[in-house]
Amino acid sequence: QVQLVESGGGSVEAGGSLRLSCAASGSILRLNAMGWYRQAPGKQRELVARSTSGGSSVYYGDSVKGRFTISRDNAKNTVYLQMNSLKPEDTADYYCNANVRYLTRSGTGTGDFWGQGTQVTVSS
């Protein structure tokens, strides 16, 4: 019913930039909070950045503050993550998450949905 598709990952040298995009589609009634998570080999998945529906409240993990920026285009059902001054320790699989109010055959539902992930590799 709801699908999230990430794009924009790739390989970049330290100090470079990447812009990740996550587009939501399906039986969407409302996109609530959206966020970006990442998981590096041997580590737990961690929250990188999060934004409320209107973008009035944002959160950044300590390791990315001042370097990453989350933004939303609600008209396109899309959330972005601009990543600047990338470091090797940013290397991970990045996942988009959205809390969604969606349409069902009998009414509505609310739940979290995940994208398939996009790889980011930063070389020194």
Image: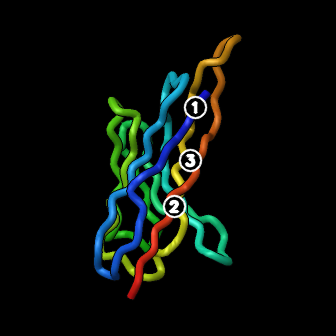
Q: In the rendered structure, which disc, 2 or 1, sits on the residue that comes first in sequence?
A: 1
Q: How far apart are marks 2 and 1 (CA)?
A: 19 Å
Instruction: Identify the image quadrant of residue 124.
Output: bottom left
Q: Is residue 18 above or below residue 106?
A: below
Q: Position of residue 7 (x, y in %)?
A: 42, 52
Residue at 29%, 80% (x, y): give it: 15
Residue at 53%, 26% (x, y): give it: 26
Foreground pick, 83 / 48: 83
Q: Where is residue 43 in the image (x, y as percent from the top left)?
A: 65, 75
Dot 2: few (<14), some (14–19), or many (≥20) neighbours within 10 Å? many
The disc labelled 2 sits on which kind of residue?
Tyr
Q: In the rendered structure, which disc, 3 or 1, sits on the residue that comes first in sequence?
A: 1
Discs 2, 1 touching: Cβ within 8 Å: no
Dot 1: few (<14), some (14–19), or many (≥20) neighbours within 10 Å? some
Residue at 49%, 41% (x, y): give it: 33
- Residue wearing tag 3: 115
Discs 3, 1 touching: Cβ within 8 Å: no
Q: Which residue, as the protein is rendered here, is positioned at the far top? A: 106
Compared across the picture, whether 16 is left or right of 123 comes to left
- Residue wearing tag 2: 94
The disc labelled 3 sits on which kind of residue?
Gly
- Residue wearing tag 1: 2
Compared across the picture, whether 3 is left or right of 87 comes to right
Q: How far apart are marks 3 and 1 (CA)?
A: 10 Å
Residue at 39%, 49% (x, y): give it: 21
